[in-house]
Amino acid sequence: MSRQIELKTNKQLATMHKAGLILHQGLDAVVAAAQPGITTAHLDQVFRTVLADHGATSNFLGYHGFPATICASVNEEVVHGIPGERVLQNGDIISIDAGAVVDGWHSDSARTVLVGTPDPANVRLSTITEEAMWAGIAAFAKAKHVGEIGNAIEDYVRAQPGEPLGILEDYVGHGIGSAMHQAPDVFNYRSGMRGPRIKAGMVLAIEPMLVRGDIATKTLDDDWTVVTLDGSYASQWEHSVARHKEGIWVITSPDGGAANLARYGVTPVPIPQN
């Protein structure tokens, strides 16, 4: 990963937003298809079809040899699950992570899906993970340094009543643009570091990953799938967010994040045309 932070022009940000909107449609289709009895390989095919229909390509397929267009991580699988013949069961929790590329510019987003009749503990896990993401995005709107995003995410998670959730530390958010993974790292916790100064033209993939138990993980023999050591279930939510001279815009959301950021007093601003 190059450590130099890439600053995008408004035109480049607009192209990333196009990629983000196609990705959004693809994730919508995958979420709708994630029902009991469906294989994770079928979910990958659903996403492939949406990309093909819109003339976009996948930034996951072939990445360091990854064999699919989505990561499908079920239950104790935290990230990088490879789609295959696993059949979704009633009560499963599955994180779908995917990306799309348009004219060389990347987007990256993830959602957690509760399959069939959900376990209330999994509903809570997914809800807190998603809201932690929005807390981080809201912080990005006003922050001076990247480290403030992780501070906001951890502060939100730790403030929730009930059983504490673990914030994964081995896998973090990242910059995104002409490549899927770029500088800077975006921690999902208080790292004790301010991080780089935020500048117009930055795009960050903000993606907290939470677990219901201990944060220790291992990678399976497929060299991709990351699971919790204690078997506890996991959730991942992610959006790619642009910071331009006028404000922020969630490029993987049709409304730029307006509906979810309103409760934080943040109004996203569309990417300027010039």
Image (cartoon, rainbow, N blue to C red):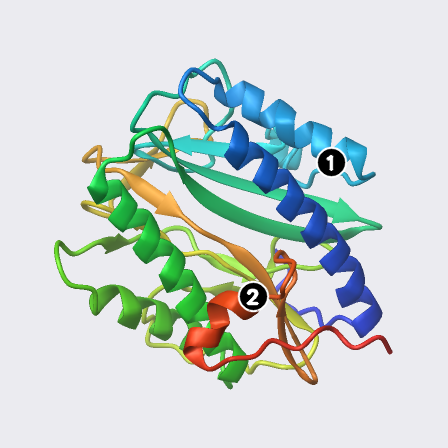
Residue 119 at x, y = what percent? Answer: 23, 36
Question: Mark 1 sits on what residue?
Answer: 51
Between discs 2 and 1, the one toward the N terminus: 1
Which residue is depicted at the point 64% across and 37% down? 63
Which residue is depicted at the point 15% across and 63% down? 161
When asked about the image quadrant of residue 225, the answer is top left
Which of label 2 and label 1 is nearer to you?
2
Report the side of 183 relative to 18 (left or right).
left
**Disc 1 crowd, CA 10 A, few/some/many (<14, 14-19, 20+):** many
Badge 2 element: loop
Report the side of 151 relative to 272 (left or right).
left
Residue 123 at x, y = what percent? Answer: 28, 45
Badge 1 element: helix
Inspect the image, locate mark 2, and give the three-letter code of the amino acid beneath it: Gly
Q: Nearer the viewer, residue 66 or 152?
A: 152
In which quadrant of the rendered image does the N terminus lie?
Answer: bottom right
Question: Mark 2 sits on what residue?
Answer: 257
- Above or below 13: residue 172: above
